[in-house]
Amino acid sequence: MTEHRWGIIGCGKIASDFVTSLKLVPNAKVVACAARTKEGAEDFGKRFQIPKCYGSYKQLVEDTEVTLVYVGTLHPSHYEHATLALEHGKPVLCEKPLCINTEPVSYTHLTLPTIYSV
């Protein structure tokens, strides 16, 4: 069975709940987290025994060990962070809402099929 190696973008309360719940999922492992500051990521990483802690979301999505990304930042940033991960070839689970209006979704609809050769 494939191991799912999660990267966590955003190290707040909702991400804490997600990581706690993820411990119950077979073949799921959190291998990295990223916050607005490296210190914030390191604090979160210590609480949940996450080996890699980044102060940059870009570093997390560039990590080849991460196979999928959870986005748990503040909702106005969801679209930006989800798109960053998708553009780096990472599947994404994003807290709601993805965006606050329809304009970004139109962009995503046009560009992601090109990235993924759909």
Image (cartoon, rainbow, N blue to C red):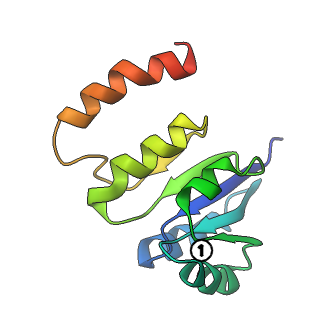
Q: Residue 29 appears in which quarter of the rendering? A: bottom right
In the rendered image, which quarter contains the N terminus?
A: top right
Front residue of 27 and 58: 58
For mark 1, give the secondary structure. Answer: helix
| Location of residue 73 with respect to 17 vertically, above or below | above
Task: From the viewer's perspective, tell me whether residue 101 is left or right of residue 77.
Answer: left
Residue occupying image coordinates x 62% and y 64%: 22
Residue occupying image coordinates x 68% and y 59%: 25
Task: From the viewer's perspective, tell me whether residue 109 is left or right of residue 18.
Answer: left
Residue 112 percent location from the top left of the image? 45, 24
Find the residue positioned furthest to the top: 118
Residue occupying image coordinates x 18% and y 35%: 102
Find the residue positioned furthest to the left: 101
Label 1 Cα neighbours within 10 Å, binned few <14 / some 14-19 / many ≥20: few
**Residue under pointer 1:** 20
Q: Residue 53 appears in which quarter of the rendering? A: bottom right
Residue 24 percent location from the top left of the image? 67, 65
Residue 80 percent location from the top left of the image? 37, 48
| Location of residue 81 with respect to 29 vertically, above or below | above
Residue 42 percent location from the top left of the image? 64, 82
| Location of residue 45 with respect to 95 vertically, above or below | below
Instruction: Name which residue type carries label 1.
Output: Thr
| Location of residue 70 with respect to 91 vertically, above or below | below
Q: Residue 8 appears in which quarter of the rendering? A: bottom right
